[in-house]
Image (cartoon, rainbow, N blue to C red):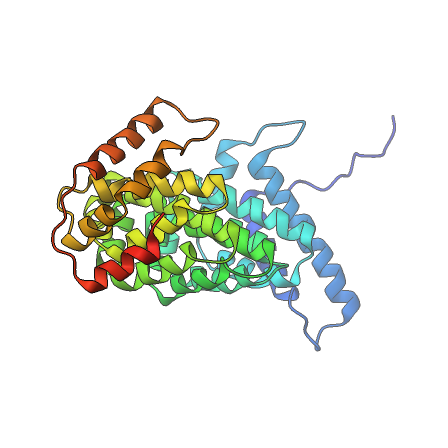
Amino acid sequence: MPMKGLFKSKPRSPVDLVHHLRSLLPFAAPNPSIRKSKRDEKIGELSKVIFEIRTLLYGDERSEPAADACVKLTQEFFKEDTFRMLIASLPDLDPGTRQDVTHVITNLQNQRVNGRFVASEYLEKNADILAMLIPGCDDSELAISYGAILRECLRHQVAAKYILDSDHFKKFFRYIQDPSFEIASDAASTFKDLLTRHKSTVADFLSKNYDWFFKEYNTLLESSNYITRRNAVMLLGSMLLDRSNASVMVRYVCSLDNMRILMNLLRDSNKTIQVEAFHVFKLFPANQQKPPEIVNVLVANRSKLIRFFSDFSFEKANEQFESDKAEVVKEIATLELKGQPCSTLKQCEEISC
């Protein structure tokens, strides 16, 4: 009988795996007091342990993940500061190991123990860990890993509220305009999740921070970068057309400056941006409490707007789009002038279609 394989080491338990992970993480960061050969050995072992944890959580080609093992690992992982240590170690890990870490944390965010999301409870007590993730969103090498982990954390309302209410959120207006495609695209995904995932939290945030938020947001709509403009106008439509943001939408469509921006986007050279801009612009004529300056601009541009919409269509236009367009034209056609100050006349010339 062949002897090979008889003395294989016994697989570690989920609790032992987390303990071993925790003991190895301090070796990730360079340390002059530790020999390079020893550190390299420990980092190699760390990568294997992280992969072993990933396999336990996801299974492999031979077996499915065991629910009981996943529960035990989740409980142990969030008992102490393993999560914090793992996030702090990310910059010192190789890309493959960082990817495994991302998969592990993604899975753990969704594990339930006795019907509760342990990760959510942990983040509520340790929300500052989210602040550790945000600087990584501005690093082209780390953005994908940090961004993916942050978005998984944002599944929990407590995490989204923490970011929205902090000064860290304002950084995303810079990140999504970064020259690096990796940074900009990943930040845009996180930005969208922050503003759409948890309806009541977003509605409360927009109501309390309306002035500075939309002042910053309008700079995205007027960006010289096509992708920034496209993403911004699409997200704006998602926010304003959501019922939970009804009061914010009413406030937004009472602003002449906001309408000016949308009218200019209707003339964008890109058809996608034009169509998305229309879905927001239609809210201005539809507003039954239009301020006089809004009415005056629409009246002053009436013939040009009606002519523009008569030719305005796209390949995948459907009945709803045509119906909305007809309603916009009808509303504009029946408007009556409400006085015409000189300042309004000047603005009319600037935004005419």
Residue at 48% of width from left, 39% of height from top? 271
**Residue 252: horizontal and vertical position, in percent?**
24, 52
In the displayed structure image, the side of residue 311 where residue 243 appears, left or right: left
Residue at 67% of width from left, 27% of height from top? 62
In the displayed structure image, the side of residue 278 where residue 73 appears, left or right: right
In the displayed structure image, the side of residue 80 where residue 288 appears, left or right: left
Q: Nearer the viewer, residue 59 or 278?
A: 278
Residue reaching furthest to the right: 2
Tally of numbered tags: 0
In the displayed structure image, the side of residue 23 where residue 2 appears, left or right: right
The answer, for residue 129, to whether it is visible in the render is no
Q: Nearer the viewer, residue 207 or 105?
A: 207
**Residue 293: horizontal and vertical position, in percent?**
18, 55
Residue at 44% of width from left, 39% of height from top? 111
The answer, for residue 183, to whether it is visible in the render is yes
**Residue 136: horizontal and vertical position, in percent?**
54, 62
Which of the 4 image quadrants contains residue 213?
A: bottom left
